[in-house]
């Protein structure tokens, strides 16, 4: 009889130990670093030509990224052919206001709202990674201040 009791007690202790171990693992998952969490990106590559320009009147194009959550990091690759581009991640409403005003007036005083960019980078090839400050539609604007037209390829990261 004492042998059966010992066997049963050992099984109960083993079961409790396994249950506690599993509980600790599941309880610690929310505390894992966020850097291993996946990020959002575009699904298919998008290529677009950007006309030439200059410092006062840059050529421009923006890739619209609708429905981005402010709790999710976002990344996309950019590759420029034929020159270099300045990239800016900006809220769509701010970008569209600038485009409307810029296209209507061509006023050299109506400069690009660079202070509204949450990420700025001048490059020929890079991965742009950012965390939106609010949920909604964001634009990745490519500005070309060279007289030569360029082609920008946006790709999944």
Image (cartoon, rainbow, N blue to C red):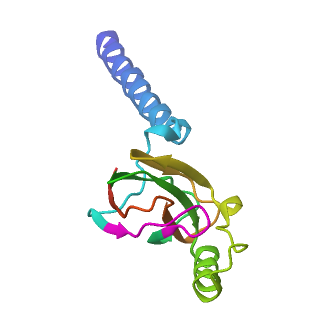
Quadrant location of the N terminus in the rendered image: top left
* Horizontal arrangement in the rendering, residue 126 relative to residue 139 (left or right): left
Residue at position x 53%, y 42% from top?
Answer: 30
In this view, the residue farthest toward the top is 3
Q: State the image quarter where residue 89 is shown.
A: bottom right
Depth check: 147 or 117 in front?
Answer: 147
Q: Residue furthest left?
A: 44
Q: Position of residue 64 (x, y in %)?
A: 45, 72
Query: Hey, which residue is sitting farthest front in the picture?
Result: 147
Residue 57 shown in magenta: yes
Q: Position of residue 135 (x, y in %)?
A: 59, 68
Place of residue 10 in the rendered image (x, y in percent of width and height, measured from the top left): 36, 17
Side of 86 where 151 appears, left or right: left
Q: Front-most of 121 and 144?
A: 144
Q: How many marks?
A: 0
**Residue 36: image x %, image y %?**
43, 38
Residue with the most extreme bottom position:
104
Give the residues in magenta.
48-59
- The residue drawn where x is 33% and y is 22% is 11
Q: Examine the rendered structure and indicate whether residue 58 appears above or below residue 30.
A: below
Establish if 71 lies above or below 103.
above
Q: Nearer the viewer, residue 88 or 59?
A: 59
Q: Residue at x 51, y 56 (%)?
A: 87
Residue 9's image quarter? top left
In magenta stretch: residue 82: no
**Is the stretch drawn in magenta largely helix, strand or loop?**
loop
Between 84 and 79, the one nearer to me in the picture = 84
């Amino acid at each position: 009889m004492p042998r059966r009791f010992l066997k049963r007690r050992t099984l109960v202790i083993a079961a409790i130990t396994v249950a506690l171990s599993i509980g600790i693992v599941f309880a610690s998952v929310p505390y894992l670093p966020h850097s291993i969490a996946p990020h959002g990106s575009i699904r298919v590559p998008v290529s677009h030509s950007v006309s030439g320009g200059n410092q006062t009147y840059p050529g421009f194009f923006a890739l619209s990224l609708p429905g981005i959550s402010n709790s999710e990091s976002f990344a996309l690759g950019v590759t420029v052919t034929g020159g270099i581009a300045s990239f800016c991640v900006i809220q769509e409403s701010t970008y569209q206001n600038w485009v409307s005003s810029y296209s209507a007036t061509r006023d050299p005083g109506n400069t690009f709202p660079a202070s509204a960019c949450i990420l700025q980078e001048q490059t020929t090839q890079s991965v742009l990674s950012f965390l939106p400050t609010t949920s909604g539609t964001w634009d990745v604007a490519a500005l070309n201040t060279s007289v030569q037209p360029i082609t920008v390829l946006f790709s999944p990261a």
